[in-house]
């Protein structure tokens, strides 16, 4: 039977990582991309999302036995590195990994390895963006399922497997409050609220394949039940994000209740803060 010591839960967040590919800004000249990526207004926005959405949801986890690696580039200015490392004091699960520019798979493999305890035979690795959140029982439920899949032999040293929670909230910050929140169950795996069971030396992790193609590459355990993620939409999303066509409008009062109870977030503080941020952007 798989035990907690055999399977370590590690997350990786590419925090304004200037690597080779992976973001729209990096398709431009490297120096020009760095100037855009590390511009003060942009970095202040990224920290606002990270410090008020992503990290609080992880700090509220019912199972605190996990690590989150903030993957950054060695080109990141010192002031932003210092601020990130300061967050490590507030959030013991957080670790900063600084790497030179590399492709998405190579860089994330090294990031997962950075947080590996050196003992666990398997890593269940999840991915998250700095402006997204996961439910407070995400780590707990992911661990239970991963351990069961390993015990059943559904995942092993040669066979990675993905755990995908499909239901969540889309939060469009640019709309009026009563139209901001949408309930949706994904038809294909989403990178957010998905994790992959693999070995520390394995070539596969949750960043290896486009999340929409994940089910064609590895075994996927899927749960479309409870709300497990908050995915934000705003004018500074690097990837293409939009409200899915058949998403259901979620009343603001219900979204706020879910924010408090399912995600460990404070809507009374968070919503006005994000509204002000959107006004500053325009």
Image (cartoon, rainbow, N blue to C red):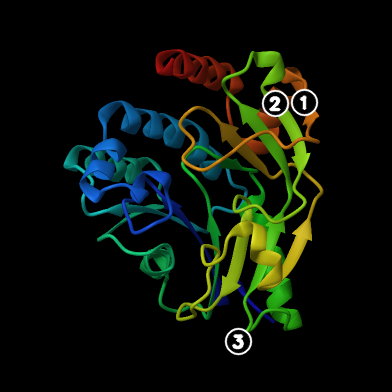
- Residue nearer the viewer, 92 or 245: 245
* In contact (CB < 8 Å): disc 3 and disc 1: no
Residue position marked by numbered label 3 in the rendering: 158
Residue ID at (29%, 36%): 36
Q: In this view, does 33 lie to the left or right of 257?
A: left
In percent of width and height, residue 83 lies at 27, 38
Q: In which quarter of the image is the N terminus?
A: bottom right
Q: Is mark 1 on a helix, strand or loop?
A: loop
Residue position marked by numbered label 1 in the rendering: 250
Q: Residues within 10 Å of mark 3 (few under 14, many from 20)?
A: few
Q: Residues within 10 Å of mark 1 (few under 14, many from 20)?
A: some
Q: Can residue 130 be seen in this view?
A: yes
Q: Which of marks 3 and 2 is nearer the N terminus?
A: 3
Q: How crowded is mark 2: few (under 14 residues within 10 Å), some or many (20 or more)?
A: many
Above or below, 221 against 76 in this view is below
Q: Residue furthest front?
A: 28
Residue ID at (57%, 40%): 133
User: What's the distance in space between the residues labelled 3 and 1, CA to CA?
Assistant: 42 Å
Which mark is on residue 181?
2
Q: Which of marks 1 and 2 is nearer the N terminus?
A: 2
- Residue nearer the viewer, 261 or 190: 190
Residue ID at (78%, 56%): 223
* In contact (CB < 8 Å): disc 1 and disc 2: yes
């Amino acid at each position: 039977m798989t035990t907690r010591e055999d399977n370590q839960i590690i997350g990786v967040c590419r925090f304004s990582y200037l690597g080779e590919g992976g973001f729209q800004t990096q398709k431009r000249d490297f120096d020009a991309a760095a100037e855009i990526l590390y511009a003060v207004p942009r970095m202040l926005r990224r920290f606002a999302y990270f410090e008020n959405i992503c990290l609080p949801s992880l700090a509220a986890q019912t199972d605190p036995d996990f690590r989150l690696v903030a993957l950054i580039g060695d080109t990141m200015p010192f002031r932003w590195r210092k601020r990130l490392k300061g967050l490590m004091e507030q959030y013991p699960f957080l670790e900063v990994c600084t790497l030179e520019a590399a492709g998405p798979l190579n860089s994330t493999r090294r990031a997962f390895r950075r947080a590996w305890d050196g003992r666990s035979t398997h890593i269940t690795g999840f991915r998250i963006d700095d402006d997204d959140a996961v439910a407070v029982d995400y780590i707990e439920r992911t661990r239970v399922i991963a351990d069961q899949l390993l015990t059943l032999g559904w995942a092993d040293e040669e066979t990675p497997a993905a755990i995908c929670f499909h239901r969540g909230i889309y939060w469009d910050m640019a709309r009026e409050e009563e139209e901001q929140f949408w309930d949706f169950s994904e038809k294909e795996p989403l990178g957010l609220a998905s994790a992959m069971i693999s070995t520390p030396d394995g070539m596969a992790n949750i960043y290896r394949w486009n999340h929409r193609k994940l089910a064609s590459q590895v075994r996927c355990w899927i749960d479309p039940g409870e709300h497990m993620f908050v995915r934000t939409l705003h004018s500074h999303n690097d990837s293409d994000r939009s409200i899915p066509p058949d998403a259901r409008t979620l009343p603001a009062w219900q979204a706020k209740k879910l924010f408090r109870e399912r995600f460990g977030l404070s809507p009374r503080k968070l919503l006005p803060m994000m509204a002000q941020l959107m006004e500053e952007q325009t």
